[in-house]
Image (cartoon, helix red, strand yellow):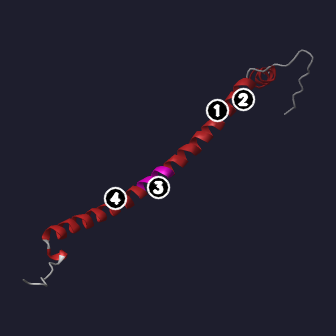
Amino acid sequence: MKRYQKKKSRWKNPGILAALAVVLILACVLAVENRRLGKVRAEYQRQEQELRREVEEESQRAEELEEYRIYVQTREYIQQMAREKFGLVNPDETVVKPEN
């Protein structure tokens, strides 16, 4: 009987080498895909910030328009437009025109 048999090296087994190669290739593919997705995520975050800013601006504009809508229904606005567009005055006012 042989007491000492030569041990087979694990790395000489083609199945283990093939599995190791597949694992390394998958690791590389995952690393590249992770980097690409990171760039896509950054772009989406930039777009989200831009859209949030636009929503804030439009909300502010909507508030201003609502204030203007309320203002144009006031007596003060109606009198101002009557003076500017039609030259009308209140009965107790006197119109003074400069001579040219």
- Rounded to the nearest angstrom, the CA distance separating label 3 from label 4 is 14 Å
Question: Which of labels 1 and 4 is toward the front?
Answer: 4
- Say which label, 1 or 3, has the lower sequence index: 3
Q: Is residue 29 magenta?
A: no
Helix, strand or loop for disc 3: helix
> Three-letter amino acid code at disc 1?
Ala
Between the residue at mark 1 and the residue at mark 4, the CA separation in whole angstroms equals 43 Å
- Left or right of 24, for residue 80: right
Name the element at disc 2. Answer: helix
Q: Which mark is residue 62?
A: 1
Q: Which three-letter amino acid code belongs to the residue tagged 4?
A: Glu
Q: Which residue is the site of mark 2?
A: 67
Mark 1 falls on what kind of element? helix
Q: Which residue is mark 4?
A: 33
The part of the chain drawn in magenta is 39-45
* Amino acid type assigned to the residue bearing label 2 in the image: Glu
- In terms of image quadrants, where is residue 82? top right
Residue 23, image quadrant: bottom left
Q: Disc 1 to disc 2, how far (Cα)?
A: 9 Å
Packing grade of label 2 (10 A; few <14, some 14-19, many >=20) is: few
On the image, the x and y values in percent for residue 28 come to 30, 65
Classify 23 as above or below 78. Answer: below
How far apart in space, not on screen, are marks 3 and 2 (Cα)?
A: 38 Å
Tell me, for residue 42, which label it has, or none: 3
Give the number of the mark in front: 1 or 3. Answer: 3
Q: Position of residue 64 (x, y in %)?
A: 69, 33
Which label lies toward us, 3 or 2? Answer: 3
